[in-house]
Image (cartoon, helix red, strand yellow):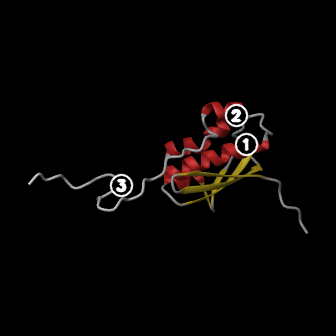
């Protein structure tokens, strides 16, 4: 039986989006499913968000990053991917990179979620206009 390549795994979440990442030794390519991350996100700002952790620690050309994202929108998926990549780098380095990643805020999960719909209202907080008469 062939030995599987060694990788580091982590999961990140943001709003409704969930991203799982595998860091393989490689040359810096980022793949989302079957396509490149640049093609999937199709936005320079979102690509910058995804690449932030590896650029911060100076290891952007050491890994092939394999992402699997689902749920939410592209922005939430990109931020979930950033958290997942940061967590995988933290696990890989045995907490050597933790202070750097923590100071940048990449290891903190953003807890904000969509507020639930309340009965009798149009949205979570929006009500119809009050009429005195």
Q: Nearer the viewer, mark 1 or mark 3?
A: 3
**Disc 3 secondary structure class:** loop
According to the picture, the residue beneath numbered tag 1 turns out to be: 89
The numbered disc on residue 45 is none
> Counting residues from the N terminus, which is met first, the one under dot 1 or under dot 3?
1
Image quadrant occupied by the C terminus:
bottom left
Number of numbered discs present?
3
According to the picture, the residue beneath numbered tag 3 turns out to be: 124
User: Based on the displayed image, in which of its 4 quarters is residue 33 positioned?
Assistant: bottom right
Query: Residue drawn at (67%, 35%), measured in percent from left and top?
Result: 101
In the rendered image, residue 7, in percent from the top left (x then y), is placed at 79, 53
Q: Nearer the viewer, mark 2 or mark 3?
A: 3
**Disc 1 secondary structure class:** helix
Q: Are marks 1 and 3 in contact (CB under 8 Å)?
A: no
Q: Report, in whole angstroms, how far the alpha carbon at label 2 lies from the one at label 3.
A: 40 Å
Image quadrant occupied by the N terminus:
bottom right
Whether residue 42 is visible to the viewer of this picture, yes or no, is no
Q: Quick one: 5 or 100, which is closer to the camera?
A: 100
Q: Residues within 10 Å of mark 2 (few under 14, many from 20)?
A: few
According to the picture, the residue beneath numbered tag 2 turns out to be: 57
Q: Are marks 1 and 2 in contact (CB under 8 Å)?
A: yes
Q: Is residue 46 left or right of residue 58?
A: left
Query: Residue drawn at (72%, 50%), measured in percent from left and top?
Result: 64
Q: Quick one: 103 or 25, which is closer to the camera?
A: 103
> Counting residues from the N terminus, which is met first, the one under dot 2 or under dot 3?
2
Q: Nearer the viewer, mark 1 or mark 2?
A: 1
Q: Report, in whole angstroms, how far the alpha carbon at label 1 lies from the one at label 3.
A: 37 Å
> Counting residues from the N terminus, which is met first, the one under dot 1 or under dot 2?
2
From this view, report whether residue 58 is shown above or below residue 15: above
**Disc 2 secondary structure class:** loop
């Amino acid at each position: 039986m062939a030995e599987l390549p060694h990788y580091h795994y982590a999961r990140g979440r943001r709003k409704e989006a969930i991203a799982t990442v595998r860091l393989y030794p490689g040359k810096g390519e980022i793949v989302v499913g079957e396509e490149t991350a640049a093609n999937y996100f199709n936005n320079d700002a979102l690509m910058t968000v995804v690449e932030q952790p590896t650029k911060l620690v100076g290891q952007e050309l050491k890994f092939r990053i394999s992402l699997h994202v689902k749920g939410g929108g592209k922005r939430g998926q990109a931020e979930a991917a950033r958290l997942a990549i940061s967590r995988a780098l933290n696990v890989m380095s045995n907490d050597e990179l933790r202070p750097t990643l923590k100071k940048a805020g990449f290891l903190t999960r953003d807890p904000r979620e969509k507020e639930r719909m309340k009965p009798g209202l149009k949205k979570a907080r929006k009500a119809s206009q009050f009429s005195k008469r």
